[in-house]
Amino acid sequence: MLTRNASDVIVVGAGIVGAACAHYAAHAGLTVTVVDRGPVAGGTTGAGEGNLLVSDKEPGPELELALLSTGLWQELADLLPPRIEYEPKGGLVVASSEPGMRALRDFAARQEKAGVTAQEVPGDRLHDLEPHLAPGLTGGFRYPQDAQVMPAHAAAHLLRTGGDRIRLRLGEEVTGLLTGATGEIRGVRTATGDIHAPYVVNAAGTWGGALADLAGVHLPVLPRRGFVLVTEPLPRVVRHKVYAADYVADVASGSAALQTSAVVEGTPAGPVLIGASRERVGFDRTLSTEVLRRLAAGATALFPVLGTVRAMRTYPGFRPYLPDHLPAIGPDPRVPGLLHACGHEGAGIGLAPVTGLIVAACLTGGEMPLDIHPFRPERFAPPEP
């Protein structure tokens, strides 16, 4: 039985990853307390576009996660209410030159060997998929496995699926971890009191490194800022998630400098979302007119019709970046009872279900859906003193 101050597991973080961890743990029979210093989806999740992508991922461990999560999101779409706005609309990656198209073709061929469906679209057929695209593009690839969801609604409804097995403690900041005589986890300390559990899951997103510090372990999560432009509601001008080929390189880059690439997608509610930018500037939320100028220019280059559309608002968010671009998922051998589920950078919404499934399997001794060795939290060497 779940009580206010004790449960089987504590999840720190009420974003989409923490919600997925709580969902799968509860459905595995565990009682869960979810603690967050803010509201549900108050951090990176609430600032996300809701992308569920395989199209932007190189073959390897992250793509394996994404392919598994694609199937899990389809299952969740049948379980959760329509308000989560799950839309399997597919992605379209476009090239403006022959060299760019050759690079896309090579990338898609390698992805297909890993299980991705990628369909080449010649330049003269792009308008069959996206009638408002700019003329003269060389071609592209359609990725039917890409989808979109409304992330804040999805997180909220995932937390509701556990019924009375999931208790929320919102507006409570974790200030310390409780440990036993041999260093094992016993719970967390908050400003309003202690919460007891033999397991703690670090799903604190961009603040995952700070929570790891409380446990005395090194996890180098850093914030990577991005902005989103939101237009006025429109008829369905953009049917897919559409982005330029250089977006893939920006996702894989480790540069701290500002990078922008055109990413444009419509939503069921009408507004068009425009990205994407990446830069490491700490937690600085200052509005950057240079970033907004680049985003608008990139979007109108792909869709000239957007040149006469009003941008209604813009907002920043911080992706939880780890240096090797792979999340930290699973038990931390340095602190018995501590598990991590953070560092997904811009892929956390897409990878949330498989992350939650892995964490639940770790907690209950269940079967792993894949080899989690690449995501081990202790893989990062501590900084030299």
Image: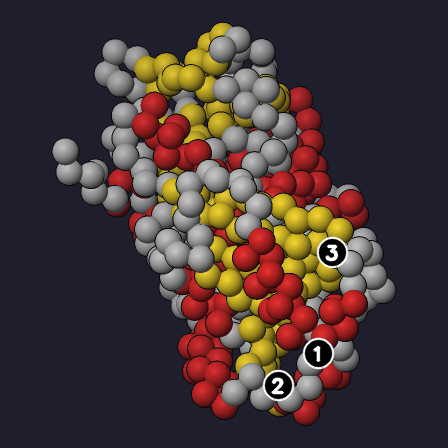
Are circles 1 and 2 on residues that touch, CB within 8 Å?
Answer: yes
The extreme right residue here reads: 235
* Quadrant that contains the N terminus: top right
Circle count: 3
Q: Give me the C-alpha separation between circle 2 and circle 3.
A: 25 Å
* Quadrant that contains the C terminus: top left
Q: At x 39% / y 42%, what residue is drawn?
A: 222
Looking at the picture, does residue 176 appear above or below residue 324? above
User: Which residue, given by chain and number where applicable, does mark 1 sit on?
Assistant: 133
Between residue 251 and residue 6, name the one nearer to us: 251
Q: At x 54% / y 42%, what residue is drawn?
A: 286
Q: Name the amino acid, label 3.
A: Ala
Are circles 2 and 3 on residues that touch, CB within 8 Å?
Answer: no
Q: Give me the C-alpha separation between circle 1 and circle 2.
A: 9 Å
Q: Is residue 96 left or right of residue 158?
A: left
Question: Are there few (<14), some (14-19), or many (20+) residues within 10 Å of tag 2?
Answer: some
Residue 320 visible in the current orientation? yes
Residue 137: assigned label: 2
Question: Are there few (<14), some (14-19), or many (20+) residues within 10 Å of tag 3?
Answer: some
Q: Name the amino acid, label 1.
A: Leu
Q: Give me the C-alpha separation between circle 3 and circle 1.
A: 19 Å
Q: Position of residue 314 (x, y in %)?
A: 66, 49
Q: Position of residue 144 (x, y in %)?
A: 64, 71
Looking at the picture, does residue 15 appear above or below residue 11? below
Question: For residue 377, which quarter of the picture?
Answer: top left
User: Which residue, given by chain and number where applicable, does mark 3 sit on?
Assistant: 311
